[in-house]
Image (cartoon, rainbow, N blue to C red):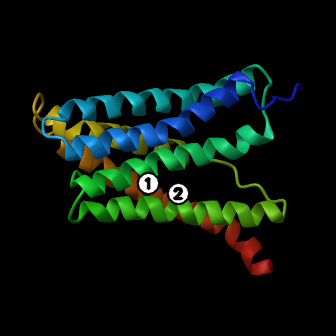
Amino acid sequence: MKRGHALALPNLLTYGRCIAVPLLAACLFWADILDGGIWLRWLALGVYIAAAITDFFDGYLARAWHQQSAIGRMLDPIADKLLVSTSLLMMASDGTIRGWSLWAGIVILCREILVSGLREFLAELRVSVPVTRLAKWKTATQLIAVGVLLAGPAADLILPGTTLTGIVLLWVAALLTLYTGWDYFRAGARHLIDE
């Protein structure tokens, strides 16, 4: 198997996703500050969609071209978490996500931190916890929910109820997040107890 290097296309796509995070945050920040900055919500959505597409292609191309690399395996989940967490925090800041819906965002963020810590601990023990099909559905639902919410205030002017749809999807993602988080914790718990 040929090992990927730091400048292989799959890794460049992952770097691009990392670079998209501050661009997305800037769009949401200025959309909130500027009067009539609703077009920046659409720009933020465009940046987000481009980043989400790279999430699919970086892994697919790395496997297809046999260019898996240590830096790619490390950065890929980090880039995903940065993208989602930054989006959630910025939308909490501008009021797109507020009230009880903040709890859905908190559940998602706490699960990501918990699972990352658990994976890091288990990696030291050379134990791998595979990604389940349900976890992939969780990620897909989460990405769609965040995308719908990014468009929310701008899309509500065209299609009323877009933000509400995004909130419902966010709660679905939060419930899947709780279940898959418990699943990961249960899978790693016996190693924690043994240690």
The residue lying at 42 percent from left, 50 percent from top is 86
Element at badge 2? Answer: helix
Residue picked out by circle 1: 176
Q: Closer to the camera, 188 or 34?
A: 34
Q: Residue 112 at x, y = what percent?
A: 53, 59
Residue picked out by circle 2: 180
Q: Amino acid at mark 1?
A: Leu
Q: Amino acid at mark 2?
A: Thr
Seen in the picture, residue 36 relative to 92 is either above or below; the reply is above
Neighbourhood count class around disc 2 (C-alpha, 10 Å): few under 14, some 14–19, many 20 upward: many
- Whether the residues at callouts 1 and 2 have beta carbons within 8 Å, the answer is yes
The residue lying at 25 percent from left, 49 percent from top is 168
Q: Residue 3 at x, y = what percent?
A: 86, 29
Q: Residue furthest top?
A: 65
Image side of residue 5 versus residue 25, left or right:
right
Image side of residue 38 versus residue 194, left or right:
left
Q: Where is residue 60, by image quadrant? A: top right
Q: Residue 116 at x, y = what percent?
A: 62, 60
The residue lying at 46 percent from left, 42 percent from top is 22
**Gap between marks 1 and 2, in whole Å?**
6 Å
Which quarter of the figure is the N terminus placed in? top right
Q: Closer to the camera, 26 or 179?
A: 26
